[in-house]
Image (cartoon, coloured by chain):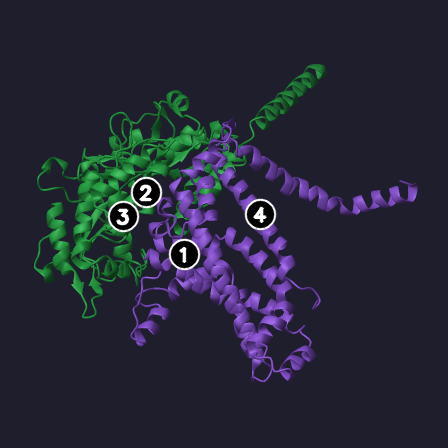
């Protein structure tokens, strides 16, 4: 009897030891996650990371706020990068072409992750050569912000077409006795948001069906012609003096925030800043379209903040586990509601968290438009956008006609390798 | 080699070993790698593909490369001589002992050089603001035209000249130290012999300080070949929004050799092309320095010889 008891005790001890050993073989592995946000926005990301880490026992995500895209890319290329990196949808093609990104299709298929619920406009922007290379967490599009008080003072209505936009801009512009601009009517600041958005709003695109760059498309030329018409009216130098004195999103020096700009092109984060930091009476409306082309109504650009897994990630499975979790509706809602973003999942738009979000209804109504497009998915987009910006500057400073400038851009873009 | 010399050689080598190892690992190896990559198509992530001289020949037809070379030459041929000449003029003035409070003036000229370049560039971004900046306020007070310093391509590089002039304190200190070396007896003898100020400058002062001039020429040539921080910070600040397509400033007037090299390497990830630019820069710097030293035999005088 004593031997049998001893035997049972030994079996129990062995079982406990074996079970413990098995358990310890399943230690949590680390997943490095480098994101671009800082400050309060980083806190939102860190809260989500903490929730993920508490939710399971396989992985520990370690987040780092690294707002320097170049640093992230160089670290990845040196083999010392993260398991998940943040970036923007415009760069997916070039990074994929460089072999920097691991495709996600196998993981998606294994876990039944689909894009069925995602806004259709953004899906192609995260694909390259038919493979899914990244997941879009939010949607970014640009609307026209209108200073209602300035328009009322000038006795003009909110513009719907590009012709009306130019007319409103001219009538709301105020010039001082010394010739300096006191109120800028046109969305000339920030200049960088104008051309991409207005090209799409005017029915243009930067590539043709064969994937060749087409900066000389009618939409871009029409957008530049409209832009140049305003500068011809008030002169390049006074406008440059005004815009180069402005500071983006600075409540003291951003002209729209100080009530010195009538029309403005900007993104959803600008609504949050306007409401938190100013009492400007404004409305956010879709970008204007050419009067002769009502079929272009509600056109514009759409892009996204994305997350990708580098091809040399050390913990690809852990990275996917976190990405999959983060892109489910509850987490996406928490992320986007905290950041003032629009979720990329359409079903998340009706979440109560967005009930009081500023201009959320306007943005989501706009995002349903089939005329919104992402930038073309090409690996040499960085080089192309530089050429486009350079030659557009000739047209914007009235040194070349929009047609000639974009023709020259097309000639140079044809040589991109 | 006898035993003692051999032992001394090995001991010397061991003492120098930290530097030799550091030089090989941190300088020679990266330089050799750059040289190799300059003959390849390479984006960091994928293996380099040998393409011969294509990177070099492509640069000859690269619009932005040609602009970068032109802008860099502007800094070398206009900004650098202007800065050195002004520094020399101010050094001569500061060397006059009869002026009261001279040490205060010297301090005033030197203080801007201790400001970090990034902070300095941001500061000048505000000083050059066309509507509320200090410079245009003065110009407006005097009834003079008030240019768009950082948005008009005609004024962007003159803006950098202003910044360079403001930070020439370190050159002034070098010239002042050299001016102090001139024996007062020579100056007095020249004065007794009836030499005017210009004759004394040409025949006594400039020959005496010529080694310092050579040193500042070499150092500043290398500095302007690698001119980066001020242009990069001012361009970023002017753009307001971090947009790589707007690097180079208005009409690419602030696109310098080093900024374009950075853009090519770390934004476009064309490492082969960037390496070719780095190799060209190395040779350009080497040739310019060689020419300066070669010609210095004719105009540099050591120890008052």
In this rendering, which labeled residue sits more in front, label 1 or label 4? 4
- Against B187, residue B278 (above or below) is above
Q: Which is more toward the observer, A170 or B216?
A: B216
Where does label 2 land, which residue?
A336
State the image coordinates of residue A210 (x, y, percent, origin top left). Answer: 27, 25
State the image coordinates of residue A299 (x, y, percent, origin top left). Answer: 18, 38
Q: Colour of chain A?
A: green
Where does label 1 land, which residue?
B234
Q: Is residue B177 left or right of residue A180?
A: right
Residues at marks 4 and 3, CA–CA distance in whole angstroms: 36 Å
Chain letter, colour purple in render? B
In this rendering, which labeled residue sits more in front, label 3 or label 1? 3
In this rendering, which labeled residue sits more in front, label 3 or label 2? 3
Q: Residue at x 68, y 44 (%)?
A: B22
Question: Image quadrant for the C terminus of chain B?
Answer: bottom right
Q: Is residue A170 visible?
A: yes
Residues at marks 4 and 2, CA–CA distance in whole angstroms: 56 Å
Q: Residue at x 21, y 46 (%)?
A: A401
First of labels 1, 4 by sequence position: 1
Residues at marks 3 and 2, CA–CA distance in whole angstroms: 38 Å
Name the chain under label 2.
A
Question: Image quadrant for the N terminus of chain B?
Answer: top right
In this rendering, which labeled residue sits more in front, label 4 or label 3? 4
Q: Residue at x 45, y 28 (%)?
A: A99
Where does label 4 land, which residue?
B287
Question: Do residues under tags 1 and 4 come within 8 Å of each other at their CB atoms?
Answer: no
Q: Is residue B237 left or right of residue A170?
A: right
Q: Which disc is residue A394 wearing?
A: 3
Q: Which is more toward the observer, A133 or A164?
A: A164
First of labels 3, 2 by sequence position: 2
In this rendering, which labeled residue sits more in front, label 1 or label 2? 1
């Amino acid at each position: 009897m004593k031997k049998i008891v001893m035997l049972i005790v030994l079996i129990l001890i062995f079982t406990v030891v074996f079970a413990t050993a098995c358990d310890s073989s399943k230690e949590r592995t680390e997943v490095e996650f480098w994101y671009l946000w800082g400050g309060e926005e980083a806190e939102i990301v860190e809260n989500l990371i903490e929730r993920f880490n508490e939710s399971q026992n396989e992985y520990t995500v370690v987040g780092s706020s690294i707002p320097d895209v170049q640093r992230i890319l160089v670290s990845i290329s040196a083999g010392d990068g993260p398991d998940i990196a943040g970036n923007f949808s415009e760069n997916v093609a070039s990074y994929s072409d460089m072999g920097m990104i691991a495709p996600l299709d196998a993981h998606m298929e294994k876990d039944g992750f689909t894009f069925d619920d995602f806004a259709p406009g953004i899906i192609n922007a995260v694909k390259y050569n038919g493979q899914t290379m990244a997941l879009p967490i939010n949607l970014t599009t640009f609307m026209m912000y209108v200073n209602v008080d300035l328009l009322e003072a000038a006795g003009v209505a909110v513009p719907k077409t590009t012709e009306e936009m130019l007319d409103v801009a001219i009538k709301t512009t105020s010039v001082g006795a010394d010739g300096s601009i006191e109120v800028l009517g046109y969305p000339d600041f920030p200049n960088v948001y104008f051309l991409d958005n207005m090209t799409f709003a005017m029915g243009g695109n930067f590539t043709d069906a064969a994937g060749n760059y087409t900066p000389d498309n009618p939409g871009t030329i029409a957008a530049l012609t409209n832009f140049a018409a305003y500068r011809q009216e008030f002169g390049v130098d006074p406008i440059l003096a005004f815009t180069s004195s402005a500071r983006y999103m600075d409540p003291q020096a951003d002209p729209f925030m100080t009530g010195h700009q009538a029309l403005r092109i900007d993104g959803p984060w600008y609504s949050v800043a306007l409401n938190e930091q100013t009492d400007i009476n404004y409305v956010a409306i879709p970008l204007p379209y050419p009067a002769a082309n009502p079929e272009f109504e509600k056109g514009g650009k759409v892009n996204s903040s994305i997350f990708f897994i580098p091809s040399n990630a050390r913990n690809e499975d852990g990275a996917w586990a976190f990405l999959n979790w983060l892109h489910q509706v509850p987490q996406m809602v928490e992320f986007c509601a905290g950041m003032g973003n629009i979720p990329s999942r359409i079903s998340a738009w009706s979440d109560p968290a967005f009930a009081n979000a500023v201009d959320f209804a306007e943005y989501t109504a706009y995002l349903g438009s089939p005329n919104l497009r992402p930038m073309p998915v090409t690996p040499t987009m960085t080089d192309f956008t530089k050429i486009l910006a350079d030659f557009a500057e000739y047209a914007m400073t009235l040194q070349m006609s929009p047609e000639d400038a974009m023709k020259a851009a097309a000639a140079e873009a044809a040589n991109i390798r | 080699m006898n035993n003692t010399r051999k032992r001394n050689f090995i001991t010397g080598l061991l003492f120098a070993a930290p530097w030799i190892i550091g030089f090989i690992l941190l300088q020679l190896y990266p330089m050799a790698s750059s040289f190799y990559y300059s003959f390849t198509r390479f984006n960091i992530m994928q293996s380099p593909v040998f393409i011969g001289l294509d990177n070099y020949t492509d640069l000859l037809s690269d619009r932005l490369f040609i602009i970068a070379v032109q802008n860099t030459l502007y800094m070398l041929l206009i900004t650098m001589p202007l800065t050195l000449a002004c520094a020399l003029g101010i050094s001569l003035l500061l060397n006059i002992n009869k002026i009261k409070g001279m040490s205060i003036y010297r301090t005033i000229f030197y203080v801007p050089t201790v400001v970090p370049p990034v902070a300095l560039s941001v500061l000048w971004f505000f000083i050059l603001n066309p509507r509320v900046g200090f410079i245009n306020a003065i110009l407006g007070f005097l009834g003079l035209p008030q240019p768009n310093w950082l948005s008009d391509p005609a004024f962007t590089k003159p803006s950098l000249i202003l910044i360079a002039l403001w930070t020439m304190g370190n050159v002034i200190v070098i010239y002042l130290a050299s001016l102090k070396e001139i024996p007062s007896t020579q100056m007095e003898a020249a004065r007794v012999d009836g030499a005017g100020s210009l004759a004394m400058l040409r025949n006594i002062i400039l020959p005496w300080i010529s080694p310092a001039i050579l040193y500042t020429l070499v150092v500043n040539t290398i500095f302007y070949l690698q001119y980066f921080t001020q242009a990069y910070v001012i361009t970023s600040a002017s753009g307001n929004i971090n947009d790589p397509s707007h690097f180079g400033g208005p009409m690419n007037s602030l696109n310098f050799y080093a900024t374009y090299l950075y853009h090519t390497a770390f934004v476009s990830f064309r490492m082969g092309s960037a390496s070719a630019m780095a190799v060209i820069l190395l040779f350009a710097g080497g040739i310019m320095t060689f020419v300066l030293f070669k010609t210095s035999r004719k105009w540099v005088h050591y120890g008052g010889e």
